[in-house]
Image (cartoon, grey):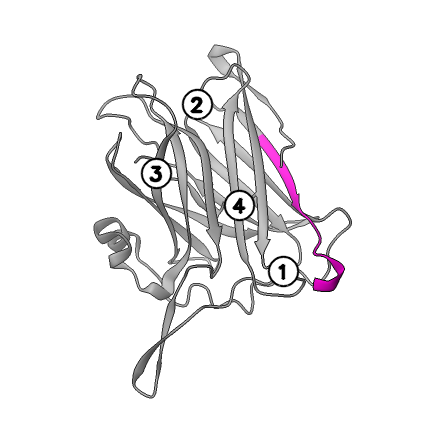
Amino acid sequence: MTSRLPLLTALVLVLLCALAPAAARATSERASLHASFSPNRLATPTTISFGFSLSTTEGAAPPPLTALVLRMPAGMNYTTTQLGLAICQPAALLARGLGGCSPNSRLGYGTALVEVPFGVGSGHEIPEIQAVSGPSPNGNLVVLFYANGVFPVSAQLVFSGEVLPDTGRFGSQLATTVPPVASVPGGPDVSIVSVQTTIGPSHLTYYKHVHGRRVPFRPRGVAVPERCPRGGFPFAAEFTFSDQSRASAATTVPCPPARHR
C-alpha cells in the first residue's frame, strides 16, 4: 500500500474539471469528483461518501498531490453530530495505528489507488485509510487521516485536515495538506490516482457506559441540510500538485425524492 490522502476530508463527486498546465512538461492535470448521502433525506443524520480521480490529458499519472480543499454544501448541521466524541493524538496514531485511538474518535474510512513512477505498475491499492478526530488548537474540527501502506511502498503516514467556514453555496471546507510519499528511500514520490472515503456513522461502532456496563451504539452523523437548493447539494474540490499546477472538479448530490423530504 502506499499513500495518504483523504479523507478526509473529507474527502465527493461528477465532473466539472478545471485544468492547469503542468510547468516543465506541458501536461494538463484533470480531476473528477463524486459524492452521496446515505440516507439522502432532509434534516437527517447521514454518512457522506466522496471520492475523486486524478489524471492528465496525456494519459499519464499526475504529479504528486500536495493539497486538497473539499467544499461542502451550506446548511449541513454539525451541531448535533456525535462523531468525534474522543480525540486521537497524532503520535499515538502513527505509533499504534487505530489501536492507539479510542473507537469514539473514528470518523470514517476509505481506500486509495496510487501509481509508482518507476515501472512497478499502476493502480496499486491502499486498502486502509482511516479518519479520526484530532486535537484542534482553534476549536475547529480536525480530521486525522491515517494511511497504512504495505506494497509496493511500505509506509505509515498521518496527515490532517481542518474543517473551516466557507461562503456562498458552500458552508464549510475541509482543507488538507498531503505529505510526500517516496516510492523507495530517496526515490521519486508516488502519485495519487483516486481516493474513495466516508465521513459518517456507517460501519462505525462507538461505546458508552450505562450502569457500569460498556454498551455499543452507532453515533449520529452530520445532518443533511433542511432544504435542497435547485439542482441539488453542491460539492467542489481544488487540487494542488507538487509542480504547482492545479485542477478542480465539482458535482452535486441530487435532492431526495419528495417522499423522503
N-terminal-most mark, 3 or 1: 3
**Helix, strand or loop at mark 4:** strand
Disc 1 residue type (three-letter):
Val
**Circle 3 residue:** 126
| Numbered label attached to residue 50 | 4
N-terminal-most mark, 2 or 3: 2
The magenta stretch spans residue 256? yes
Q: Nearer the viewer, mark 1 or mark 2?
A: 1
**Helix, strand or loop at mark 1:** loop
N-terminal-most mark, 4 or 2: 4
Estimate the spatial distance between the alpha carbons at disc 3 and disc 4, rounded to whole Å.
16 Å
- Taking the spot 41% from the left edge, 68% from the top edge, the residue there is 85
Disc 2 residue type (three-letter):
Pro
Q: How far from the left and from the top, in percent, is residue 261?
A: 72, 63
Q: Nearer the viewer, mark 3 or mark 1?
A: 3
What residue span does the magenta drawing correspond to?
Answer: 248-261
Disc 4 residue type (three-letter):
Phe
**Helix, strand or loop at mark 3:** strand
Estimate the spatial distance between the alpha carbons at disc 2 and disc 3, rounded to whole Å.
18 Å
